[in-house]
Amino acid sequence: MAAYAMWGLFPLYWPLLAPSSAVEILAHRMVWTLVAIVGILAIRRHWSWFGPLIRQPKKIGLLVLAAAIVSLNWGTYIYAVNTGHVVESALGYFINPLVSVLFGVVLLGERLRRLQWAAVGLGALAVVVLTVDYGRLPWISLVLATTFGTYGLVKKFANVGALESLTIESLALLLPALAYLGVLQSNGTATFGQAGTGHVLLLVLSGIITAVPLLCFSAAAIRVPLTVIGLLQYIAPVLQFLCGVLILREAMPASRWAGFTIVWIALAVFTWDSLRRARTMRRAAAPVPQPERATT
């Protein structure tokens, strides 16, 4: 719950980093996330994994790919928040479970149940309704949902722990981030150090607020049933949506409410079917009680 709550409140943080651009914030986030992760590793004295992992080029390649995908996700999200599209970004994380289901069908050859198809169909209908409402494809939502779903898929194939994989991903992003920040400094267009000490501290803290929820999620993933995690994942987009509507006062015309309502119905159908399926599987796996033998 802590992890999803922190992710859900991110829309209140990134606007504080003005006048930095979305790309500059993204570069700082990459750098300071690595610093935060190295600090955590140092405190835990958790280095023994690095040598064996670095000798597995397939896993390293997958993590580098994951790093590129998550950087696109982060950059799009920061851009969305800082340009007044928080509600549209929330939509991306609402439809992400449906995108993940489609990936299962297209890439992993999985078969959907009828209610899952109904949920996916409703999700597609919602995108059509919101396209009409916005006058364009809700591209921010689609990019966020697709990249986050792809990121999860690549991480599934890599099969590396959260802290370890985040370290490799951050290392992969370090040089491009430093290069970009160096160009900004040389051009005199960097905001780091030019907008006050508070702004510097906020940029540095972006690494910590990136790492902490990921560590909370990692700790929960090995303790909490997947069905519970699946239900809790809606905390983040709900909070993002509420931030956009109630705090940042983004417009919500009737047509947009209609599109979101369709999405929520699709998620209700999807969640109900998933819970029913999990309950059926638990019953099937439960041991059959044996009749007691009569004693004489």
Image: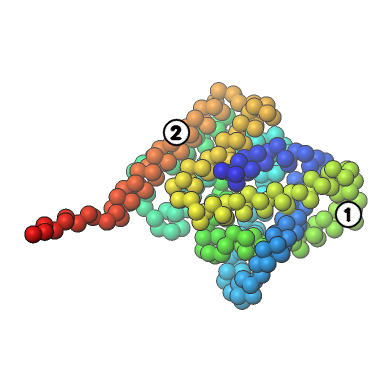
Q: Quadrant of residue 62?
A: bottom right
Residue 102 location, x and y as percent? Answer: 46, 50
Q: Quadrant of residue 35?
A: bottom right
Q: Label 2 sits on what residue type?
A: Ile
Q: Nearer the viewer, residue 102 or 161?
A: 161
Q: What colour-coding does the image apply?
A: rainbow
Residue 100 location, x and y as percent? Answer: 49, 50
Mark-to-mark CA distance, 1 and 2: 49 Å
Callout 2 environment at 10 Å: few (<14), some (14 to 19), or many (20+)? some
Tell me: residue 72, above or below residue 122: below
Name, please, the residue furthest toward the left: 296
Q: Quadrant of residue 38?
A: bottom right
**Mark 1 and 2 residues: CB-CB less than 8 Å, in contact?**
no
Q: Secondary structure at mark 1?
A: helix
Identify residue for label 1.
185
Q: Residue visible at 62% across and 54% down?
A: 215
Residue 140 location, x and y as percent? Answer: 62, 42
Query: Can residue 142 be seen in the rendering of this structure?
Result: no
Q: Nearer the viewer, residue 237 or 177?
A: 237
Query: Can residue 257 be seen in the rendering of this structure?
Result: yes
Is residue 239 found left or right of 187 in the rendered image?
left
Q: Nearer the viewer, residue 38 or 125?
A: 38
Q: Label 1 sits on what residue type?
A: Gln
Tell me: residue 201, above or below residue 46: above
Identify residue for label 2.
265
Q: Residue visible at 65% across and 32% down?
A: 244
